[in-house]
Amino acid sequence: MLKNIHPALGADVLHALRSMGHGDTLVVSDTNFPTDSVGRQTVIGRPLSMANLSAPQAIAAILSVLPLDTPLQNSACRMEVMGAPDEAPDVQCEVQAEIDRAEGKPCPMYGIERFAFYDLAKKAYCVISTGETRFYGCFLLTKGVIPPAGA
């Protein structure tokens, strides 16, 4: 255990989050996402796991240490529902609430078409699989910066 670190953040996930740089993206995926095949194509070359958590729980833990990029960028993205791109399933609404809570203000997610999402996921820094069983529980987060003290 570490002080002031969310207990759901294991060593591998913490190492990946710390190693990422400004503008790097990570995938938080549901149980139906091709985690292994896509994860092997990412920067770290293997999938990571937070399998005991739902997507909203995993994102809350991740955002307890990871700054999101500025709202001017696509810093938080969701996989669009096929045939209904503007529809936001419950899992996406719950994740949106966690993002807004972590940022302290509304930070709307952008939708990405399913197959475009897969293509972007292959270029990500890492894929973190969750125990999320609901459809469309897949998200991209882009790392931002932490300004120096007094800035």
Image (cartoon, helix red, strand yellow):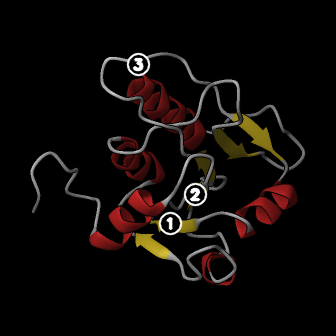
The quadrant of the image that shows the N terminus is: bottom left
Could you tell me the amino acid type at mark 2?
A: Leu
Q: Secondary structure at mark 1?
A: strand
Q: Position of residue 108 (x, y in %)?
A: 63, 25
Q: Marks 3 and 2: CB-CB under 8 Å? A: no
Q: Which residue is mark 2?
A: 26
Q: Marks 2 and 1: CB-CB under 8 Å? A: yes
* Label at residue 136: none
Mark 3 or mark 1, earlier in chain: 3
The one of 6 and 15 positioned closer to us in this rendering: 15
Q: Secondary structure at mark 2?
A: strand
Q: Position of residue 44 (x, y in %)?
A: 55, 77
Q: Position of residue 28 (x, y in %)?
A: 54, 58
Q: Position of residue 69 (x, y in %)?
A: 58, 35
Q: CA distance from mark 3 to mark 2?
A: 21 Å
Could you tell me the amino acid type at mark 3?
A: Gly
Residue drawn 34% across and 62% down? 14
In the rendered view, would you say 102 is above or below 31? above
Residue drawn 45% across and 38% down? 67
Could you tell me the amino acid type at mark 1?
A: Ile
In the rendered view, would you say 137 is above or below 106? below
